Image: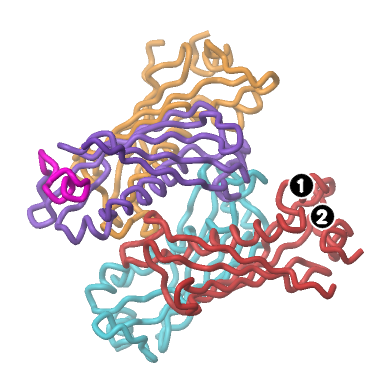
Chain colours: A orange, B red, C cyan, D purple
Amino acid sequence: MTKTLHYTIDLEIPFHDVDMMEIVWHGHYAKYFEIARCALLDTINYNYPQMRDSGYAWPVIDLRIRYAKPASFRQIITVRAEIVEWENRLKINYLITDKQSGARLTKGYSIQVAVDMATQQMCFASPAVLLEKLGIL
Amino acid sequence: MTKTLHYTIDLEIPFHDVDMMEIVWHGHYAKYFEIARCALLDTINYNYPQMRDSGYAWPVIDLRIRYAKPASFRQIITVRAEIVEWENRLKINYLITDKQSGARLTKGYSIQVAVDMATQQMCFASPAVLLEKLGIL
Amino acid sequence: MTKTLHYTIDLEIPFHDVDMMEIVWHGHYAKYFEIARCALLDTINYNYPQMRDSGYAWPVIDLRIRYAKPASFRQIITVRAEIVEWENRLKINYLITDKQSGARLTKGYSIQVAVDMATQQMCFASPAVLLEKLGIL
Amino acid sequence: MTKTLHYTIDLEIPFHDVDMMEIVWHGHYAKYFEIARCALLDTINYNYPQMRDSGYAWPVIDLRIRYAKPASFRQIITVRAEIVEWENRLKINYLITDKQSGARLTKGYSIQVAVDMATQQMCFASPAVLLEKLGIL
């Protein structure tokens, strides 16, 4: 695969995501990652509904979030998601920056594996449908 | 139906429900209502899974929340849910009080109607299964 | 006040807002209302931070949400917020429609009252600052 | 410190935490971790309010969650939090198991560092107040 698979979105921090320390509560970043991930998966036409239609669930099995700087109410953040592994599992890296200054706020990754919905078995290699969607097969 | 259908639970306000004004963000009360509602529906063995198994979805069509006093981090609240209508729709009233003082914090209601999952049609009267679960039929 | 105070935003339903009935969980609409409300309050420069700077908190004391049709994952919804009362309290009406078809999905309102942060007393009339921001004084 | 610092709580999975794949949405585990963490910090009287009163914020700078098995609506889970580092940062490990079977569902950790609220500087060693609360100083 020579093409780079990434996608970038902008988000404005809503009031209901900010905690009493006046910063975004750390758990909400899983949502920001997901919004960028789904937008990225839409570009290859393999978002959650298509995953399910293909007979595979793709649960997240590992999530990591590293916080360098906090974000606050009404701040515009840029969330970049990039597919970095796909052969045996789907690993996506994330980078969140402040839209205005470009300052790095948060980074992390998620790892998903295919589960055959008929047998409920985890797949040790990614099914062909992912590689087709990625344009490799 | 002569028996009164109500149920009461206690909850401790978690950190992630508190906003930058240092009170519970108003939208989270829908969760507190739901936790009490599901505990109540468990007592008649007609919670979401049994609803679905009976062929009916019961979407909320009306929700009202009135806030008298705020709640804050680590406060213990008591949530009381009571079924007050069931013939044509399922109306549940809620009352949230401070566990220690008994002070009234929030009240509200939810209204749900049966939707036949086979036809996707809304039912104008509650299906027999609800009345059976309530011990009326 | 002859000018109409309303504001409209578009939102895409994220995966994490959808429940096991495959529709948006009803409590999440409080977030959609809030995002439109804050965007509206930004237009008069009297959003939460300016409220606090002016010495008043504006807690929501009443919230109502009426659901006509469900929304689902990746659906684009349009949320319209309109200020309809301001003299003694701030009442905002909301209307959510499907962006593509224009079908009405949800409507509701929120009512907020001013609380003097110095005395913690609720104000029985809206403070002058709100009327100034609205261009009435 | 010879004593082991851990705390265990039970939680019932609420309806609003379950996604359209009929399992708990992966991002909600940050809440379960936090509820156990706050209960643990309460035992040493150094939860968020006491942290702030002591002049330090303790933002989470690293969060990792590894998912072995999913959890579903109404499942009772046991969340164990244990302080495993405290000298330079506060690292807490988490283990979530099914209450009934004891099966391991999820594990992870959070890392927090002290930030002096007066100077907004990150502390390279934990302030004395943490060690006092832990009974080491």
Q: Nearer the viewer, residue B43 or B137?
A: B43
Residue B121: numbered disc: 2
Q: Nearer the viewer, residue D61 or C63?
A: D61
| Residue at 36% across, 32% down | D64
| Residue at 9% across, 57% down | D118
Residue B72, percent across and down? 38, 67
User: Mark 2 or 1 closer to N-term?
Assistant: 1
Rendered-image quadrant of the N terminus of chain A: top left
Residue C97 colored magenta? Answer: no
Q: How far apart are marks 2 and 1 (CA)?
A: 14 Å
Residue lying furthest bottom in this view? C124
Residue A3, percent across and down? 38, 16
Q: In this view, does B30 lie to the left or right of A20?
A: right
- Identity of the amino acid at label 1? Arg
Up/down of D86 relative to D15, above or below = above
Q: In which quarter of the image is residue D73?
A: top right
| Residue at 55% across, 26% down | A58
Which residues, given as a range, are shown in magenta?
D123-137
| Residue at 89% across, 59% down | B128
- Label 1 sits on residue: B52
Q: Quadrant of residue C120?
A: bottom left
